[in-house]
Each structure stands twice: as structure tokens, then as C-alpha cells.
Image: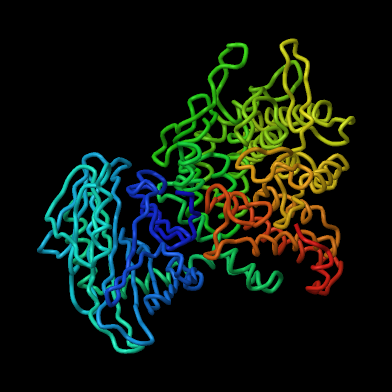
Amino acid sequence: MRAMPRSIVVGNGNLLVNYDANYAVRDIFWPRVGEANHTMGNICRTGFRVDGKFVWVSDPAWEREIGYSGDSLVTLVTLRHAGLGIEVRFGDYVDMARDYFIRNLRVSSPAGFRSAQVFFHYDWYIDGSDIGNTVLYDPKHRAVIAYKGDRYFLLGGQAGTEFGISSWATGKKGGPAAGTWVDAEDGSLSRNPIEQGSVDCTIEFDLGAAAALEGKALTHWACVGSNFESVSNYGQELILQRGEANYRVRTTTYWTVWSDKDRRHIADELGPEVERLYRRSVLTVRTHSDNRGGIVAATDFDITKFARDTYAYVWPRDGALVANALDRAGHEDMTRKFFAFCRDVRSAGGYFLHKYTPHGYPGSSWHAWMDAGGERVLPIQEDETGLVLWALWEHFRIHHNLDFVAELYTSLVVPAADWMAGYFDDRNDLVKPSWDLWEERWGVHAFTVGAVWGGLQAAQNFGDLFGDAGFALRMKEARDRLRQAADRHLYRPELGRFARRLSVEPDGSLTADPILDSALGGLWRFGMYGPAEPQVVETMHAIRDELANRAASGGQARYADDHYFQAEPDLTTCPGNPWFICTLWLAQWYIASARSEADMVPARAIIDWTVRHQMPGGLLSEQLDPHTGAPLSVSPLTWSHAEFMVAVDDYVKRVLTLRRAGSRTRKLTRKELLEAGGA
């Protein structure tokens, strides 16, 4: 089965649920976001049987309108099926505070129906395994309960005012057994009371008959907890006592207010569509931020079909950049938790490893502990250590929360910065080799150099803030040394730009990698170079011209001849699939280097390009097909959303600054934007 992008995500920082483009539930993470996927990305089917005809939501005949209710994490989805003659409206959500996954449906038909049944199927891999699971029917609660260890799921609900499920099936799956979902297609479930091992389950709600346009309502809930009492007495019983509407209203209100915490009117400058995607990006990033601090890159489990692993880890680099976007949006409550997470997981030496589980353990890695010559090396990407400190200083600069950063000064800033200041190669005054941000190459990378410089500058700032003169001086000397070395070694006159990587040969000499890479923007992004310095301008112009996708979907590639999910081998047309991250980096440079509002036109075009290439639910993938614009790799990618948030934030601030400085005062017309071209 081909991978299907995740198009809707709902969650509360403990419980996260992903839907695919058909609106089938695919991923259920709990109790930490990104850790323990209890369905392992398999399809959990939703089906409808109307007057003897049956279809699943995966049926291609459905017409789908997929989205959210305003700026909230409550879905607003409409499915229409001509063959069944029905329209189904969904309003699904995870409660803001309690670990309830609630699905509200209203089924109607222009002609009415004599009978209608709705089926919900769950393919269980509790705690990531199909071994040792149990599913059972509990007559007291008129619900099916699935459990293993301290993971419990109560599947109940009500149709109209009728409490409880109408029928159920529990059974084996695997081998010759397809699963209980097959039972639903004839409208009659087996009602087996219990099953264990590799199991799934299907529950049914009987809606009865409905007159033309009358519509029948149904609420289904999955209460999630660590024991039976937490999903029954403190789950279903509370929903019944307080009413499901109480949870729906408070969840809608909470996320609507939360997403607009910064209270900026982005639509005034960039239009309502950009503002909607900005707010959706803030919410999407939040769903991937665990309440204990880990910011997960992505939870789309279909990537396992390609890599046999997931993106459901906390990369300090990705997390730092996402935290910076959240800080800009006013959400210091979440970013404080991330920086505390970083404090707790950093190594004794002060650096960060490749990635971490949401629990804080080292994640799986392909970074070797020895180099090509067999010598022991650190299995790291040094940019991750630098960016955490850079983001922490930006956090303080925005929020001025002195007491918080004071707690992290000796426990995070000093050890990380001292390690970076000592991790230099005395032969060339550059940082020692490590892995690049794309996790593919070993060497001294321009992005890493820029990120480390930004981290050292942040550490110097903290030293000055806390009156630690000796520490601040050491950091200044280290960053000055790094800048001078970059001038000598990274800028290559023969290329007319910076090199993306330097390989250190056994004799200490340096070999430049001539391949053009969008990550070269890291040299200005974190402050090492100014965006208008000639070397930077030359480099960014090369990126703009040589990494542009000339196929229909536009956008910018990561680097020349990028093979990751490569969709077009003709490099003259497409040097690599377009990435949202890399395209938005170019927009950010246009903004940073703009001297008038007219200079902002290309950035505005890229922001609009991003809006055009969002998925129907407002999510951004990692990559796009260069011809069709279809999403490739994982969706959503929090880093993509973060870079969009940053570009929008940069744009709004910069255009106001330019106007105050007396530059062009009128807003640019749509015609001017179109004439300027897009990404």
C-alpha cells in the first residue's frame, strides 16, 4: 500500500491522533507525543452501511472537504457519497486537558434512509507491538476496552440519546485472519466477548431511520489512560455526567484563544489566507510538542515504509528552530519546557547527541563513533548544540524572563559553550568535523560553522548579562577566531561563493566541496555574516538561481542532485525536490536584505507559494513533487511550519520597519506581486 500523507492532526500534548488524506485514523500516540504509536500507522477504518449498502471512508467515491473549525484543533470535515446518498459531517477533537479522543458525526441524506449503521475499527499495536494485546466487551459500560500493561483504551459513545455501542467484534488478525473490520461489511458483528494476542476490534452504532434531510447524530469516544478506572470512572463517566458538548466548547475556545496569543493582524499585510496558515502552523507545532518538553519532528508513521524508522524523535536542531518560532508567536510556556528538556538530556561533556526519544533517551542513529581512519569521534551534529544556545538567547531577548535563564546558565549554557569553544581544530581554527544538518556527510560544514558562531555569541551575551566577564571573553575570542577562519577557508574565490563543506585531509589540508547547498544560508541566519555582505549576496544569488525547481510546482531544492525521495532525475529541470524549509530560507534572506518595500516582493511571492502548496487541512509536508506539487516524505513536518512562521514574522516586522524609515508606503498590488514571479 502506498504511503498516504497525514492531512489532519489533533492532540493536547499527551495524546496525538493523525488522519490520512481519506480521513481515516492512522496514528494514536500516548502518553508522550511521538512515543508509543498504538496503531503503528495502520489504517483504523470508519465505515457506513446505509439501506444495505456499505462503504469505508477510503472509498475513492467520497467527495471530501477536510479542514478545521476556525483556528482550533477541532475538525470540520464533510464527506459526501453519491452511491450511498449520504452526507457526513465530522467534528473530532482531543480534549484540551483530558486524554479523550472524541468524534462527532452527523449523517444525513436528501432522500432519507430506512437504516444506517456506523462502524469504527481499531488495529491495535499497543505500545508498538501486536503481541500481548487484549480486547474485550464490558457490558456495564457498553463499550469495548483494549489494553496492555498500563495502556488502556475505552471505546464507547452514544447515538442520539442512546448510550453505548450497538454491537462489536473482537478478534485475531494476521496470517489468514484479515481482522474484524471484514465482519462489518455485511452489517453483522460477531460479538465475541474477548480476544488476546494480535488483535483488532470493530464497534457499531445503529442510527435507525431518518427522514429526508433529518440527519442523525453520533458521538464516539476513545478514553485513554493507565488503568481501567482512569478510562471508565474518570473517562466515560465524566463525559456522560458533564456532557460531551462541555468538552467540545472548551476545547474549541481554548485553542482559538491560544493560537492568537501574539494578537498580530497578519492579514493586514499578507492577507487572510497567510494568516490562516500561520495560525494553523502554530497549532500544528503545538500538537507535536509534548507536555514534558520534547518537540517532535514528525509523527507520520508511513516513513517507516521507506526508512524502517520514524521522524518521531526530538532533534535539538529542529526543536531549537521550532522553539524560536513559538517564542516569536508568544508561547514561552511551551518553549521553557523544551529548554528544560535540553538541559536534562545534554551529555556530561556539554554537547547534544544526534536525536532523542520524547522520553529523553538517546534515539536511534546512523552516526558512527569512528571516522574513516578508525579513530574514535563524537557521533554528533555540532550545529544542534550551537542552535540550542542561540534559541535560548532569542527566547530571553523576546520574553526577558531573567529568572528562568538564570537557572539554565550554569546547567546548560556554560557547559555547552565551553565544549564548543574547546572543540576547535588548531590546524585551521575551524570547528572539528561532525555530521551535517542533513545527516549525510562528515566534515566541517558552513551551516555548522554559522550555528556554532550563533551559539558562542549567545553564550557571550549570557556571560555579559550575568557579569561573568572571563566566560564572556572566552566566548568572544572563540567566535572571532571562527569568523576569521571562515573568511580564510570557507569562502572560495574559485566558486564565487562559500563552500558548503570542507573535508580535513590526513595532512591537515582542506578540500572544498563544490556542491551548492541551501544550508549555506546558515552563515547569515544566525548572525555570523550580515545578509548584505558581498560574499553572502553572491552565495544566496547562486542558491536562488541554481537550486530553483523549474518544473511546475516551483520552490527550491536542498542541494544539487538530491537523491532523497528524488522524483525527477533531470537535474536541468529539477536539482532536487522542492523543500518548504529551503524555499522559505530564501524568503527570509530577501526580507533580511531588503532596503525598500519593493525588495520584499520576492519574499511575498514565496510566502504565497507556501500557502498554495499547503495540504487541504493546512499542513505542510517536508518535500513536494517537483511537477505535481503533491506532498512527499512526512507530513506535517514541524520544521516546515516553523520556517513559515518565521518568514511571516520577519515579513511583518520588516515591512513596518521600512515604512517607519520612510521607504515606499503604499501596499504592493496583486499585479505587482504576480509580475515579480514566485518561488
Above or below, 562 against 4 in this view is: above
Locate residue 245, reporting x and y percent.
Answer: 31, 75
Locate residue 81, reporting x and y percent.
Answer: 42, 74
Locate residue 615, reporting x and y percent.
Answer: 56, 61
What's the residue at 68%, 25% (across, down)?
443
**How is the model colour-coded?**
rainbow
Which of these two is toward me, 642 or 419? 642
Which of these two is toward me, 180 or 472? 180
Report the number of discs: 0
When asked about the image quadrant of residue 379, the answer is top right
Above or below, 452 against 33 in this view is: above
Above or below, 625 against 663 in this view is: above
What's the residue at 83%, 72% (across, down)?
665
The answer to whether one can see residue 399 in this image is: no
Tell me if 604 is positioned left or right of 197 in this view: right
The answer to whether one can see residue 168 in this image is: yes
**Quadrant where the image shows the C terminus:** bottom right
Locate residue 111, reporting x and y percent.
Answer: 35, 87
What's the residue at 48%, 60% (across, down)?
21
Which of these two is toward me, 381 or 664? 381
What's the residue at 33%, 83% (across, down)?
215
